[in-house]
Image (cartoon, helix red, strand yellow):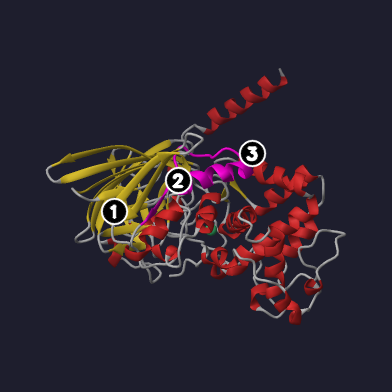
Amino acid sequence: MRKRLIVSAASALSLFLAVPASAADFQPGAAGIGDPYYPTYGNGGYRVSHYDIRLKYQPATDELEGTTTILATATQDLSRFNLDFALNVSEVLVNGRAAAFATSGEQELEITPARPLAKGSQATVVVRYKGVPSTVKKYGFTAWHRTPDGAVAADEPEAAWWWFPSNDHPSNKATYDVSVLVPDGNQVISNGVLTGTSSKAGWTRYSWRENKPQATYLATLAVGKFDITTDTTASGLPVYNAYSKDLGENADAARASVERTGELVDWLSGYFGDYPFSSVGGYVPNVPTGYALETQTRVFYSPKQFAKGTNTSVVVHELAHQWYGDSVSVAHWSDIWLNEGFASYAQFLWSEHENEGTAQELADYIYASHPADDPFWSVKPGDPGADNQFSNAVYDRGAVAIQALRNTVGDEKFFKILKGWPTERKYGNATIAEFQAYAEKVSGKKLGDLFKTWLFTPGKPAVGPVVPGAPAAASLAPGARDDVKALVEPKSWKKIQDAHSVHEH
Ligand SMILES: [Zn+2]
């Protein structure tokens, strides 16, 4: 009864607030969503729930034209709002009426609707545009990668600006329909499920749907000539993989790795709980770049990842992100450890499974192989700064921190945390502080000192990631630099390292 009263009081209040305000109360939305590392990324004043991206792309000339329809809800009385975008815009409509627009900064598209948007109201925003994305540089680079037969959009933390206007920050996730018209004989790869293809007058349309919330940087697009493989995993999940037809000597190693996606995603489910999405797979376009990226449901791999032979470790890393990064996404970019620490730790688990070194051996090796004066230790994985967001320390020290957590709470509680967290926070966003609180709740232990030591304090921790009470290896004594040689490099180490060839511009 009490609850009912509260509810009706609240709705009375919102009715009161819905009384039209004077025009002076409508303010422009902020040009950034409030990220400490990237102040202009994302925007304030509204939330996007869906992107409908309809494109026509000519691989021969890199000409892209499109219309993106955005469903948004105003979170304040808005006189104007921004999208993040880099191509030339020809027209913007808001709720069916032409809107004024202008560009500012590197990637801001400022939209002034004909009628201001009241807080809580829904808006349908249509943006028409075109451009040659590979020629458009922002902050000195383009995230649109040309291949011999087409192009790829896959980058972190920014990739969307070159193919669709967006509220470009992981804290505003949305569902997607991506429909692209390409000349017959080309394929289009994107996230989720291929819902249909149709051909007419020399052009083929591919329509993709991602029906679960997805961060903008995890949306991907590739156009080119691919060999496609489809299957279902033992657990019944549809698999869709694609390989550029011109991978040359790397083709077989790429297939021998990525074709194990179904097996590996089922294996990871044992640690992380049910897979959160409705399809899985990867694609290997013939890009010159060296990194892989956990684009949602359809991982992007560079052929260079397979230049030294198969690498199932990188596949494990990117698939682990489907839980740690894609389903549960960072609240701010400073929370990147929640992505990279856990994806790297999944590689430790895979190494253990393959008898190529236990998680403890890998953690000991990382701890011992960096002397105290190594700049490696100056990066705080829990708040690395924008310049070090993808530095080795976020991955390696970040994974050692997770082994330290495992040793502190014990295996039973640790694996409960590992599986419980992505289940509890499915499709949401989270901070490191929230993860710590969750781990404390499950383990019944105060973990403040552990998190502070391993994630938030520059410098080499005085004690390695040892099991409390167990004798530490002599080589792990503080300052034991000469004993590094005594530590044998785990067999899996090089492949683990290869998985985080960094996203550099
Ligand atoms: Zn990663």
Query: 264 and 479: which one is in front?
Result: 264
Residue 10, position in %: x, y? 61, 28
Give the residue drawn at x 39%, y 63%.
303
Give the residue drawn at x 57%, y 61%.
36
Tell me the amino acid under the disc marked 3.
Answer: Glu
Q: Earlier in the sequence, mark 2 or mark 1?
A: 1
Q: Which residue is mark 2?
A: 297
| Rendered image: mark on residue 223 | 1
Give the residue drawn at x 68%, y 49%.
435
Q: Which residue is mark 3?
A: 424
In the displayed structure, 249 sits above or below 20; it is: below
Q: Is mark 1 within 8 Å of ligand 1?
A: no
Q: Which residues are magenta?
A: 260-284
The image quadrant that residue 102 belongs to is bottom left
Query: What whole-number distance in Å separates the C-alpha atoms at marks 2 and 1?
Result: 17 Å
Q: Nearer the viewer, mark 2 or mark 3?
A: 2
Does residue 59 appear anywhere in the picture?
yes
Tell me the element at label 2. Answer: loop
In the image, taking residue 196 as reference, residue 363 lies left or right, namely: right
* 282 part of magenta stretch: yes
| Rendered image: mark on residue 185 | none
Q: Quadrant of the C terminus?
A: bottom left
| Label 2 Cα crowd, 10 Å radius (few <14 / some 14-19 / many 20+) | many
Q: Earlier in the sequence, mark 3 or mark 1?
A: 1
Query: 204 and 267: which one is in front?
Result: 267
Tell me the amino acid under the disc marked 2.
Answer: Thr
